């Protein structure tokens, strides 16, 4: 796992170290001022996740998928989305499009990534309409830097703009932290017992 950790450190860099004091000063409700949006997201998502890896392109994504599969002993991965199936196919990893007891993990895309609380926003399009209890224990998410938004409201506005009247069902944010009026809590009820891992892929779309 050393390679994964070193790449994670490259994402945070000095900015992450300097942000800790600023976070205490601004409180739990707001990210530190001037903190890069990718660092805010990574810091908050990683607080309760199994892992996080920033990759610069698709070649690194495929390499990272192979590393993660080896690290966590994943023999078969559930992939409902055609693009995720293609990633696994090109990574030369075993996958299935059906829910089976042999599936060790599920690989999904996401709609948006929210820096404010580190949540990956998904809907039933990513999960095939399946309930959380029907999905494998480990959930691997592929997100892109152009999907990063400051707050959940920005994600919901983006979904409305993208889908119009055909708005998907089951929209939820997973991972990261839940910020209440007076505290930060760990996971939404549906996530408890789930192991979350996210690839953040650099994209040229703005």
Image (tube, helix red, strand yellow):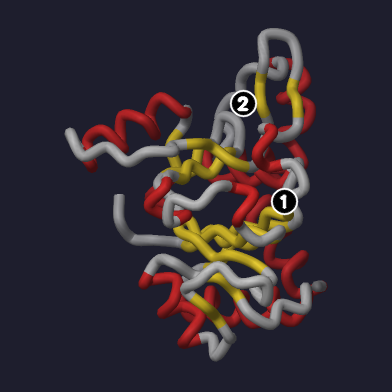
Residue sitting at the far bottom: 92
Residue with the mark numbered 1:
194
What is the crowding at mark 2: few (fewer than 14 residues within 10 Å), some, or many (at least 20)? many
Q: Position of residue 167 (x, y in %)?
A: 27, 37
Give the quadrant of residue 126: bottom left
Q: In the rendered view, does 183 fall on the left or right side of 82? A: right
- Which of the two residues, 184 or 43, is positioned nearer the viewer here? 184
Residue with the mark numbered 2:
31
Q: Is residue 144 visible?
A: no
- Which of the two residues, 198 or 60, is positioned nearer the viewer here? 198
Q: Position of residue 117 (x, y in %)?
A: 60, 31
CB-based contact (under 8 Å), mark 2 and mark 1: no
* Residue at image point 40% right, 47% down: 111
Q: Position of residue 13 (x, y in %)?
A: 70, 52
Tag 1, which secondary structure?
loop
* Residue at image point 59% right, 34% down: 35
In the rendered structure, which disc, 2 or 1, sits on the residue that comes first in sequence? 2
């Amino acid at each position: 796992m050393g390679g994964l950790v070193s790449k994670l450190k490259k994402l945070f860099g000095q900015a992450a170290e300097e942000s800790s004091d600023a976070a205490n000063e601004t409180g739990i409700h707001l990210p530190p001022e001037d903190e890069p949006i990718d660092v805010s997201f990574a810091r908050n998502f990683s607080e309760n996740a199994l892992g996080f890896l920033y990759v610069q392109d698709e070649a690194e994504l495929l390499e990272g998928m192979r590393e993660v599969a080896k690290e966590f002993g994943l023999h078969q991965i559930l992939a409902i989305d055609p693009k995720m199936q293609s990633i696994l196919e090109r990574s030369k990893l075993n996958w299935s499009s059906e829910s089976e007891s042999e599936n060790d993990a599920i690989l999904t895309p996401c709609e948006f990534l929210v820096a404010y609380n580190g949540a990956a926003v998904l809907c039933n399009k990513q999960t095939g309409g399946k309930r959380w209890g029907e999905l494998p224990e480990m959930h691997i998410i592929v997100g892109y830097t152009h999907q990063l938004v400051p707050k959940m409201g920005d994600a919901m506005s983006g979904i409305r703009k993208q889908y119009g009247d055909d708005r998907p069902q089951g929209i939820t944010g997973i991972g990261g932290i839940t910020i209440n009026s007076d505290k930060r809590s760990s996971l939404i009820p549906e996530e408890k017992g789930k192991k979350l891992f996210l690839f953040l892929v650099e994209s040229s779309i703005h």
